[in-house]
Amino acid sequence: MTPLSELRVGVLVPTRGDRLMLLENALRLIGRQTIKPHRVEVVGDSPKSEACDITYRYRTGYEKMTDVDVILFWEDDDWYVEDYIETMLVEWDKAGRPDLFGSRYTLYYHLKLKRYFKMSHESRASAMNTLIRANIKGIDWGKDDNAYTDTLLWMGASPLRNRSLFTPCKIIAIGMKHGIGKTGGRGHTDEFRRYVNEDEHCNFLRSVIDEESFQFYLKVHEQLRDNGIAD
């Protein structure tokens, strides 16, 4: 078995050129990881339509990344702790190195509302917290305009039968919701009633993320407030 230190790790970032500031921050977060990826694949080609096409971008990136052993999905607008890759690899190794691996919960933070909630999963992880083995043939990705890649990967009938979830002992990532761009699904941002935890003074957010990220997302909040973007 290949030691973790010798694994070729890939990071796949789906984007479509409509939130470049967020993508720049995502690349900064990747660059500060305690374990640096062997390859970062940004799938940012021009969209074919106005439809959400995140599944197309995950599928395309996965098929391109044939020179790595494992791939971590990394969403362009979300926040990841500096040892995120390391944590995922260590826990994946403990679980027996399954084909598909991820976190049992997702923490979502709405940047305009300054509220958040935690979503627990019984049988899947969110795409933003998913690790997948590379070079698996016959994966059923579903339609390219499917907005929820994670549901089909984890719940559908595909070669990814060896799957495992873990519960992180700390917050390792936050799904940032804002309504900028059309890369992914929109269900979490439309249902404001889910955001039951208020963070009026951003004390929660500041206690979790690094200061540079905090200042960045604070600027995003100010832009959302000024521009009236609500979802």
Image (spheres, rainbow, N blue to C red):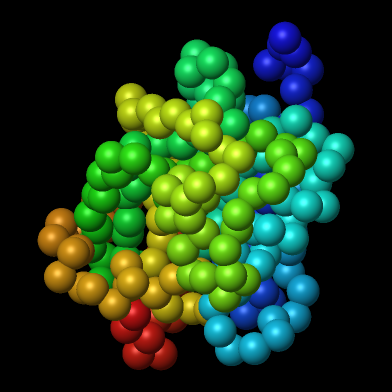
Tell me if 219 is positioned left or right of 23 in this view: left
**Residue reaching furthest to the front:** 157
Foreground: 9 or 222? 9
Residues 41 and 114: in front is 41
Residue at image position (74%, 60%) is: 60
Residue 214 in percent (x, y) is at 43, 54
Give percent across and percent down for residue 46. Answer: 75, 80
- Image position of 15 with respect to 34: above or below: below
- Residue 198, by quadrant, is bottom left
Residue 148 at what x, y percent from top left?
A: 46, 63
User: Vertical placement of 154 versus 140: above or below?
Assistant: above
Q: Residue at x 49, y 70 (%)?
A: 147
Give the residue displayed 13% in from the left and 61% down from the top: 196
**If the image is split into quadrants, where does the C terminus sit?**
bottom left
In terms of image quadrants, where is residue 15? bottom right
Examine the rendering and report whether any part of residue 207 can be seen.
Answer: no
Q: Can residue 123 be seen in this view?
A: yes
Q: Which residue is drawn at 41% across and 61% down?
A: 176
x and y, in percent, of residue 32 in the image: 64, 39
